[in-house]
Amino acid sequence: MKKIPITEVRGFQIGQAQDRERGTGVTCILSMEGATGAVDVRGGGPATRETDLLDPKNMVQKINGVTLSGGSAFGLESSSGVMRYLKEKGAGFGMKGLVVPIVCQASLFDLPCGDPEAFPDKEMGYQAAKNSENNEFKSGCYGAGTGASVGKLMGFEKAMKSGIGACAYEIGQLQVGAIAAVNACGDIYEPDSKKRLAGIFMKETGQALDTEEVVLSMMNQAMERMNTTICCIITNADLDQAQLTKLAGMSQNALARTIRPVHTPNDGDTVFAMTTNEVPCDLTAVSVIAIQALMGAINDAVRSAEPMFGLESFSSLEAAGISQNRE
């Protein structure tokens, strides 16, 4: 597999907008011609929009965009701005002379990071969509990853800063990429590894705690519900909507191999998938690449994050020579 920038996956344009002072943002992945869309939701606390539409038995098969945002349920407003942009461009589901852009969304809970009153609104969504004309992507604390953090189980002050990341591969004409905004309940690890990248961090002692062990120690207590990892797979594989739904579901394996624990009642873990249906390929082969891409995107989100809002990050701890891993 050849690794490529996420912006080289043909048929899509990516835009971001953010408020780095207040700690929230939007990332949108657009298909002006329309792409087959699917979704798999596994977390117990999702904030989503238009996911029912993506059931293969329903009428609409193609969508024009996926919006990933901060702001929890408030952030769902940002897709209205994305829709306005797409309507201005004439992109959408046509019926009786009207055009209705189809935009799906998932939001993560970033309200404790920065200003708790800040969330992506219609204007920020419109700006992200407008910025997609440049088709640029920044990993780390940008777009939907601006206010993302992990390791909040013992309170926000013991969390670490995360962000948004991307990874894409190409084999021949086939292209598969992934974008992930990581705001997980669990710790983030390198794929299938014991090397921890981020999670609960005790500043006063310089000690990293294992979230799974903390969960067991707090089994009779209420736990924080401020989490969610939201993702989008983009590809040009020729898959129908049922196959693409299976791809979204199989791609959740990437979360299971990099986040521990994952898909908890405190998470809203959601994976969208979009395809331009250009290159014939076996579904299993596409899923193998998609899982690798999504694992790479999750790790990129954590490795690229900066220390912000009083939180340490993987990069700041590494620069200070502080290990999060047990010998």
Image (cartoon, rainbow, N blue to C red):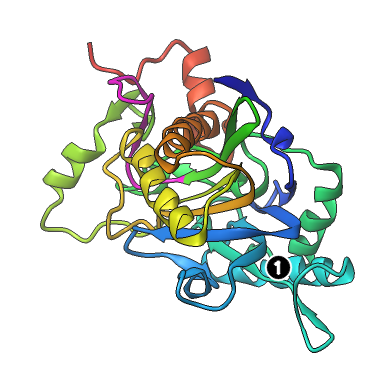
In the rendered view, tell whether residue 301 sits above or below residue 82.
Answer: above
Residue appearing at x 35%, y 47% in the figure:
185
Q: Which residues are magenta?
A: 183-196
State whether the magenta stretch is mostly helix, strand or loop.
loop
- Residue 309 in picture, x, y percent from top left: 57, 42
Q: Is residue 133 left or right of residue 157?
A: right
Where does label 1 land, which residue?
A: 121
| Residue density around tag 1, few if under 14, some if 14–19, many if 20 or more, within 10 Å | many
For residue 228, say whether it is visible: no
The quarter of the image holding the N terminus is top right
- Residue 324 in picture, x, y percent from top left: 34, 21
Residue appearing at x 76%, y 61% in the figure:
124
Residues 118 and 1: in front is 1
Residues 69 and 39: in front is 39
Q: Is residue 208 left or right of residue 101?
A: left
- Residue 71 in picture, x, y percent from top left: 57, 62
- Residue 226 in picture, x, y percent from top left: 40, 57
